[in-house]
Amino acid sequence: MKTTSTVPERSGVTKTSVEARVAGYDWTAVSEELNGHGCAALPGLLSPEECRALSSLYSDETHFRSHVVMARHGFGKGEYRYFNYPLPDLLGGLRTALYPRFAGLANRWNATMGFDQRYPDTHADYLVLCHGAGQNRPTPLLLQYSPGDFNCLHQDLYGELVFPIQVAILLSEPDKDFTGGEFCMTEQRPRMQSRVEVVSLRQGDAVAFAVHSRPVQGTKGTYRVNMRHGVSRVRSGIRHTAGIIFHDAK
């Protein structure tokens, strides 16, 4: 997978600084990666200090609306917590700044696949649609994995309205904080075996990826593939990840 350009130096968590770092990526290249492979890396989206600050929130339940232990539901092993509104400034700012970078591509995907849903230019306007459909609960989350934990292949669908791209940010440092725990995706193609994509990330790197389905150009025209994502078994240490999902949940 190709990488995109580095982001500007961070000078504080403000709306302007978050928008500036997001604008620093080559978004044409990001869209090409998403179109070609269903995922795209965003290297260095967060600094190590920001990663540690987000990870440290996990133990404080006041930030979250729910706590999920994966093994209780057959999701894998490990756990995660969904944030309450208002979101932490950094996470909320990234959600707002990243959404319009994907909205145009999301609309093109839906048009190509024959889906009626179209997405407004701003995330605030999209949340109005979500909340009008009864999807009022925030979906950004923190995930925590210990040795032996893993996340089964899945899709993050929380209601009728689904934004087709989401973002995961690795908050821990591979080979220092943990080993194993690779981000994985599968692409289920019609009448063919599934394709696997493994994305190597460092601390602070993010990956944008297809939530559910995406169009693929074949020799006889465009067809739809079904996407799932997960995390391989953590061999040692503790792995934290932040997830940015753009649609809210019922």
Image: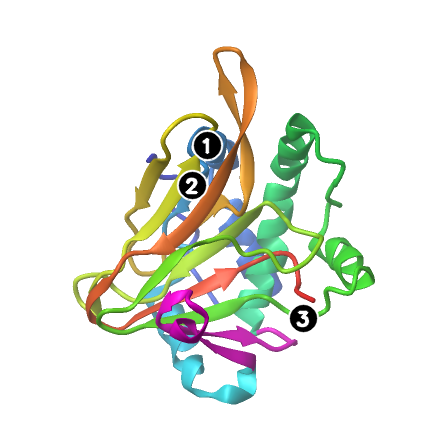
Q: Is residue 124 left or right of residue 52?
A: right
Q: Which residues are magenta?
A: 65-87
Of mark 1 and mark 2, the one earlier in the sequence is 1
Residue 148 screen position, x and y as percent:
23, 69
The span from disc 1 to disc 3 (Cα, nearest Å) is: 32 Å
Q: Nearer the viewer, mark 2 or mark 3?
A: 3
Which residue is located at x 55 percent, y 66 percent?
Answer: 140
Q: Which residue is mark 1?
A: 29
Say if 138 sits above or below 222 in the image: below
Quadrant where the C terminus is found in the figure: bottom right
Residue 204 screen position, x and y as percent:
36, 59
Of mark 1 and mark 3, the one earlier in the sequence is 1
Q: Which residue is mark 2?
A: 40
Q: Is the residue under label 2 in contact with that under label 1 (CB below 8 Å)? A: yes
Q: Describe the element under mark 2 as helix, strand or loop.
A: strand
Say if 182 sits above or below 149 in the image: above
Whether residue 5 is visible, yes or no, is no
Q: Is residue 41 magenta?
A: no
The span from disc 2 to disc 3 (Cα, nearest Å) is: 27 Å
- What amino acid does circle 3 point to? Arg
Q: Nearer the viewer, mark 1 or mark 2?
A: 2
Q: Is residue 79 magenta?
A: yes
Whether residue 29 is visible, yes or no, is yes
Q: Residues within 10 Å of mark 3 (few under 14, many from 20)?
A: some
Which residue is located at x 67 percent, y 34 percent?
Answer: 110
- What amino acid does circle 1 point to? Ala
Of mark 2 and mark 3, the one earlier in the sequence is 2
Q: Describe the element under mark 3 as helix, strand or loop.
A: loop
Q: Which residue is mark 3?
A: 137
- What amino acid does circle 2 point to? Ala
Q: Is residue 16 left or right of residue 123?
A: left
